Image (cartoon, helix red, strand yellow):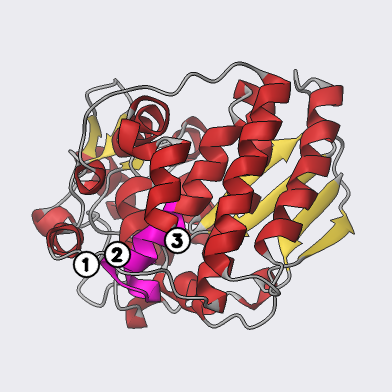
Amino acid sequence: MILRTPTFYKDFKCIAGACPDSCCQGWEVDADEESMRYYMTLSGDIRDKIDNVLDKDEFGNTIFRLAEKKRCPFLNKENLCDMHIAIGGEHTPYTCRTFPRFINNFGGTRELGISFSCPVAADMMFNLKEPMSFNDELIDEPPELNEIDAQTYFYLCKARKKAFEIIQNRDKHIKERLLELLDYGAEIQSDLEDYKEGNEQIDFFDVFHNPELINPEWTEKVNNHKVRKIENTVFNETIASYFIFRYFLTAVYDYDVLSKIKMAVIGVLISTFFGSDSWTMHLWSKETEHSQYNMDRYKNLLKSAKCLSVESLKEYLV
């Protein structure tokens, strides 16, 4: 299997208790089945604590019930994980072991990246100077079984390469690149499947008032937004590249590539209107990409909301 990662990926290191935020606060963590099977073999204080905080969410998933201030019940006063200390990081839940990484499997290729939701990862991407690029390495794992249409997958791989070329063309202002990217996304979408944009009336900034609130600071960001012109910065290019890498090829599963392109454009608008710094992108990502409820709403609005149509987004760009 081929493993593809951003060139900066291996430089990422968690700073644990020194982090300005905590990935162990604000959201519930699922107790995945593999981890649960291991926990059932334990005894002593850690087993008692696990048993005492297990719960079910509204979807019937097994979760760890949060403590006060939405802190993970295993997060101690030093902002370190008592479970990690007691049984090792390899036995923490899957979400904890992988965060802030995201993983996309495409049969013989696995793509692995880091999310803006981690402040350290966000800072790394904020400070990139060169265009986002990637390393491929051969790992000793067999291809995963899948139902991917090979022809569509290779078509999207070629299209994504072109999308990167568009967004990383520094001979043009970033707003010109984003306009070109939207047109290219519409062209690619027409080759895949009909895409009917909706006419739902919602204000652009109301899109970002998520129903599931993780950090009130994000609400302040949205309420204090300022409409500005897009700056021709490396960070804006990096934001668009991040979304192209993370989401573009997932269109092989739903044939909706235009929404993925819109996410790249909107990502730059988030930085422009709510704060052109890594912390703003961190807050947005933690609120949206790591809340299934908020993310499902956002994906629906990408197609249904008039303010997120291609033509409406172009108006924000010019």
Where is residue 268 shown, x and y percent of the image? Answer: 45, 61
Is 179 displayed left or right of 11 in the figure?
Answer: left
What's the residue type where badge 1 is placed? Lys
Where is residue 181 shown, x and y percent of the image? Answer: 62, 49
Q: Where the C terminus falls, by quadrant? A: bottom left
Is 188 displayed left or right of 205 in the figure?
Answer: right
Q: Residues within 10 Å of mark 2 (few under 14, many from 20)?
A: some
- Of label 2 and label 1, which has the lower sequence position? 1
Please determine whether, in this image, residue 59 is positioned above or below residue 243.
above
Where is residue 63 shown, x and y percent of the image? Answer: 30, 36
Residue at x 12% of width, y 59% of height: 223
Please determine whether, in this image, residue 8 is positioned above or below residue 37.
below
**Location of mark 2 (residue):** 273
Q: Is residue 286 magenta?
A: no
**Location of mark 1 (residue):** 226
- Of label 1 and label 3, which has the lower sequence position? 1
Is 148 displayed left or right of 243 in the figure?
Answer: right
Local SS, label 2: helix
Note whether residue 259 is visible: yes
Q: Which residues are magenta?
A: 266-282
Q: Nearer the viewer, residue 207 or 144?
A: 207
Q: Nearer the viewer, residue 89 or 113?
A: 113
Please determine whether, in this image, residue 315 is positioned above or below residue 32.
below
**Location of mark 3 (residue):** 268
Distance of mark 2 from mark 1, alpha carbons?
Answer: 5 Å
